[in-house]
Image (spheres, coloured by chain):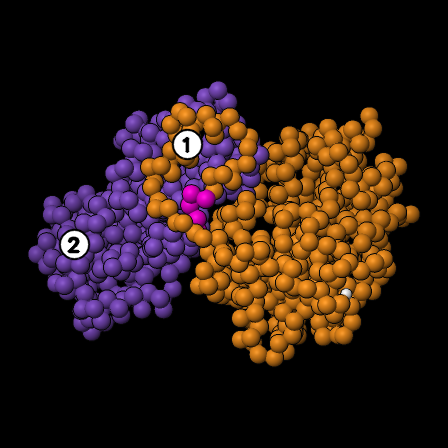
């Protein structure tokens, strides 16, 4: 069967998108592949399609639980039942059940953390693995913006599984991060597929303010006049809530906040409402977005700057996946860079904490990790510390304290990593403030050649932001129908009267026609 | 008056100044200790256990101060007592919420979220699949819920019939409730054509405070659980089937459960103290808890019949649940432990021969 036929049979697409066929062909030749493709361009097809050609299972390492589960759900919905996600949040019984029938799965999604579990590795060893996929591969590089120590063990894990071919996927990685990925994953004779970071259909504008209030007013003004749906990024939970509240007060009702402080259930509801076009605007922290595939996002406004150009490019890349004209607005007020600066300090343990831990006699990795939880240290700082101590052989010598030189190495590492991160922020600020074509500079940072500039290029090239305003600015008039719970209950259980029933019952149609009954 | 104020008034009335503010806070924000559990039982407030999970001290005290300023509660030294005006407000509050006692924090605290996830996912799947639409995102990300729904979800040809019956069950149960409860409940569910609302959104649509919307929703969950697993379960077979997927929890603290297992295996109190290497007072706390929640536990080895009778008499004469006053009237040979055991047994079953009101 031809690849294109398989693509349409299994996934319902007629054509490959840029790069997919090339990557798949290399994988079929059993090559290691590093593929950099912008988010939303169908990275997952690159390993899902070979899944129907290879005889063994495909292991997909994914850093985020939600991302993983979205993928599994998507596959299941498209009819692929032989899919499973293994993660540390599964209860014991469920995990046991899955591990005992691993070989029956075509796609096995795993978190990097669960691959540290020896029992899991041993079970995986028993099955035949045709492809080892590392999603968000930039997480393996400490030069990258989302370094995760658990990724560093993936190479040894892959070799334990008999060195199946490896596919490393990422959306944004600078050349040095790409080199790092190849090295850390021990990808020899690796074939590289790099597709552009530049998205010609997204206009890039930057606005600078000296007064915070002016910036706030502008953000609210823009969000309520730009053509939606859109995303407003803020750096803290309270700002995400704040912006949503401001918008509501201005009469924009279909808006909600989304951040890590909300209950899982509530976050999922917001996400679904946005995907189903029941909401126009999401005000969120960077917790929102990964794995969200909504084609018609028209604008992304940054109320606060992210901490690196990589994050920025990834976040604005959520706009315009349908290829239509979209807008990215960066709103900057002097001093904004202090917020990501503060985050950096929290990402690493303090010097005193390192020294304290180093002075304790070693007593096993688990109890060490448990002890750290009692410290006022965030998760990434704890992970960093456990990993560094392990690397220095601390847990191997029970009862011993950490030697002087090891202590120095760790402290040095913290200092240099913080300095790197600060440089990333500086790069971001420079991009914001500089008098140059914003698009050209992004291309330059990611070592791309810019072939041509679109008409609506960037604020430096005088892109016209008014082109992105709603055509008639009379906001969606909200007719709030009074709630009738009896009627709602009928709708829930498909108990409408017969004529109505027929109309709804026959459809696989767009549920949108009903949506307006209740607005929020 | 919002739900928190109303329920706090109810607590003040029941506690009648016999417990400190902390005692009330720990009860309503769900701090599971032997003390809270036995207080809840003693003052007939167990149903309000964890009614406001995560409520902080500061916010709690603000509400209390608000009640004091409104003269609904009187402050006497460090104790708080409901005023006559407060009583009136409370009566009004309870009248507007006739089923409030269906809330059962002690029993359903741990089951409410799994139940809510199960309903959300099951009902959404039914809502879509009865319209032959299968392309939708599940309502939760919880693998346990997926598993449960998969296990009990009806076959294709039965779905419309099950939807019809479940509709009837919900209609019958929700019809008995005041509208705001039913309204919040249906709005929070996702169906074909509309994603469920968050608490904040539901509150905005209905003109409620967010905490009230959340309470209303949780109240309906408790109410459904009660009817779906209680004596009337046969009337609501589909709901009953849903509830049977869950493990409704044990009201004992984990530590007291261990003590109870040891007791049942024939160990004496002294042996348990040494096996568990715990203080005597801790094990005593466990026994008090056990006496409340395990009807098959006999308190006789710890309190003689004659002692029991003396404690009951003192309690009836003094008309107080203040242990100190009861203890003072009884003298040195009756320990606090014995008094708590007897009062623990008293609670709902009224072995003291007089209902505690
Ligand atoms: Zn430009």
Asked if one can make out residue A245 in the rendered structure from this viewpoint, the answer is no
Position of residue A231 in the picture relative to residue A136 (left or right): left
Q: Nearer the viewer, residue A104 or A342?
A: A342
The residue that label 1 is drawn on is: A493
Locate residue A242, reporting x and y percent: 49, 65
The residue that label 2 is drawn on is: B91
Point 52% across, 51% down: residue: A279
Q: CA distance from mark 1 to mark 2?
A: 37 Å
Point 54% across, 56% down: residue: A472
Q: Is mark 1 within 8 Å of ligand 1?
A: no
Position of residue B144 in the picture relative to residue A499 (left or right): right
Shade representing chain B: purple
Locate residue B43, reporting x and y percent: 22, 54
Q: Quadrant of the N terminus of chain A?
A: top right
Residue found at the very far top of the displayed protein? B157
Q: Nearer the viewer, residue A331 or B179?
A: A331
Quarter of the rendering containing residue A453:
bottom right
């Amino acid at each position: 069967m031809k690849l294109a036929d398989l693509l349409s049979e299994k996934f319902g697409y007629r054509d490959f998108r840029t790069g997919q066929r090339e990557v798949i062909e290399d994988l079929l030749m059993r090559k290691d592949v590093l593929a950099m493709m912008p988010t939303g361009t169908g990275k997952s097809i690159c390993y899902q399609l070979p899944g129907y050609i290879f005889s063994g299972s495909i292991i997909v390492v994914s850093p985020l639980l939600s991302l993983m589960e979205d993928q599994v759900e998507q596959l299941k919905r498209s009819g692929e039942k032989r899919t499973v996600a293994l993660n540390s949040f599964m209860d014991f019984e469920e995990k046991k059940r899955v591990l005992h029938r691993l070989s029956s799965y075509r796609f096995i999604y795993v978190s990097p953390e669960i691959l540290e579990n020896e029992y899991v590795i041993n079970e995986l060893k028993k099955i035949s693995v045709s492809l080892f996929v590392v999603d968000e591969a930039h997480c393996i590089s400490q030069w990258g913006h989302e370094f995760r120590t658990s990724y560093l063990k993936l190479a040894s894990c892959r070799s334990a599984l008999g060195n199946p071919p490896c596919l490393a996927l990422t959306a944004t990685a600078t050349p040095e991060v790409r080199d790092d990925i190849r090295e850390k994953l021990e990808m020899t004779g690796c074939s590289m597929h790099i597709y552009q970071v530049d998205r010609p259909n997204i206009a890039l504008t930057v606005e600078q303010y000296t007064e915070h209030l002016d910036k706030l007013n502008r953000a609210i003004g823009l969000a309520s006049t730009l053509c939606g749906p859109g995303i407003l990024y803020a750096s803290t939970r309270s700002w995400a809530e704040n912006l949503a509240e401001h918008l509501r007060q201005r009469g924009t009702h279909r808006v909600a906040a989304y951040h890590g402080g909300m209950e899982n259930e509530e976050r999922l509801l917001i996400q679904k409402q946005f995907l189903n076009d029941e909401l126009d605007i999401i005000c969120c922290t960077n917790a929102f977005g990964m794995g969200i595939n909504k084609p018609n996002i028209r604008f992304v406004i940054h109320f606060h700057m992210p901490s690196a150009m990589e994050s920025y490019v990834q976040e604005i890349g959520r706009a315009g996946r349908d290829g239509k004209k979209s807008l990215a607005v960066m709103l900057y007020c002097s001093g904004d860079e202090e917020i990501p600066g503060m985050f950096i300090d929290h990402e690493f343990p303090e010097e005193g904490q390192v020294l304290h831990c180093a002075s304790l006699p070693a007593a096993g990795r688990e109890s060490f990790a448990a002890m750290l939880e009692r410290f006022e240290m965030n998760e990434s700082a704890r992970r960093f510390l456990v990993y560094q101590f392990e690397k220095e052989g601390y847990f191997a010598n029970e009862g011993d304290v950490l030697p002087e030189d090891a202590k120095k190495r760790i402290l040095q590492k913290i200092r240099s990593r913080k300095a790197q991160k600060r440089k990333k922020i500086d790069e971001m600020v420079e991009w914001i403030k500089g008098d140059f074509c914003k698009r050209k500079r992004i291309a330059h940072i990611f070592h791309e050649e810019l072939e041509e500039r679109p008409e609506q290029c960037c604020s430096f090239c005088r892109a016209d932001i008014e082109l992105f305003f709603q055509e008639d600015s009379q906001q969606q008039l909200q007719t709030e129908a009074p709630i009738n719970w009896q009627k709602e209950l009928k709708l829930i259980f498909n108990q409408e009267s017969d004529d109505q029933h027929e109309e709804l019952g026959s459809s696989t149609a767009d549920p949108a026609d009903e949506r307006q009954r209740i607005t929020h | 008056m919002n739900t928190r104020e109303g329920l706090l008034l109810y607590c003040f009335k029941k506690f009648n100044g016999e417990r400190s503010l902390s005692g009330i806070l720990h009860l309503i924000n769900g701090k599971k200790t032997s003390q809270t559990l036995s207080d809840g039982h003693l003052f007939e407030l167990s149903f309000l256990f964890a009614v406001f999970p995560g409520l902080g001290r500061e916010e709690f005290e603000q509400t209390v101060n608000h009640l004091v300023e409104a003269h609904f509660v009187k402050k006497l030294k460090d104790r708080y007592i409901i005023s006559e005006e407060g009583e009136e407000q409370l009566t009004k509050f309870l009248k507007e919420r006739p089923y409030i006692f269906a809330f059962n924090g002690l029993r359903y605290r741990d089951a409410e979220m799994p139940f809510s996830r199960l309903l959300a996912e099951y009902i959404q799947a039914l809502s879509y699949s009865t319209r032959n639409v299968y392309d939708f995102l599940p309502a939760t990300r919880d693998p346990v819920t997926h598993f449960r729904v998969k296990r009990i979800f009806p076959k294709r040809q039965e779905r419309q019939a099950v939807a019809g019956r479940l509709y009837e069950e919900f209609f019958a149960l929700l019809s008995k409730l005041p509208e705001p409860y039913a309204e919040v409940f249906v709005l929070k569910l996702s169906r074909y054509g509309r994603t469920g609302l968050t608490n904040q959104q539901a509150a905005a649509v209905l003109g409620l405070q967010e905490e009230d919307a959340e309470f209303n929703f949780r109240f309906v969950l408790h109410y459904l659980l009660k009817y779906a697993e209680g004596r009337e379960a046969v009337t609501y077979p589909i709901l009953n089937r849903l509830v049977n997927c869950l493990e409704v929890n044990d009201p004992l603290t984990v530590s007291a459960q261990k003590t109870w297992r040891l007791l049942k295996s024939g160990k004496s109190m002294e042996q348990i103290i040494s096996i568990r290497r715990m203080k005597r007072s801790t094990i005593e706390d466990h026994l008090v808890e056990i006496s409340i929640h395990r009807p098959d536990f006999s308190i006789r080895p710890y309190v003689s019949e004659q002692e029991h009778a003396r404690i009951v008499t003192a309690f009836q004469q003094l008309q107080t649940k203040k242990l100190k006053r009861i203890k003072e009237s009884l003298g040195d040979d009756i320990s606090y432990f014995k008094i708590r055991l007897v009062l623990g047994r008293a609670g709902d079953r009224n072995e003291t021969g007089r209902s505690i009101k």
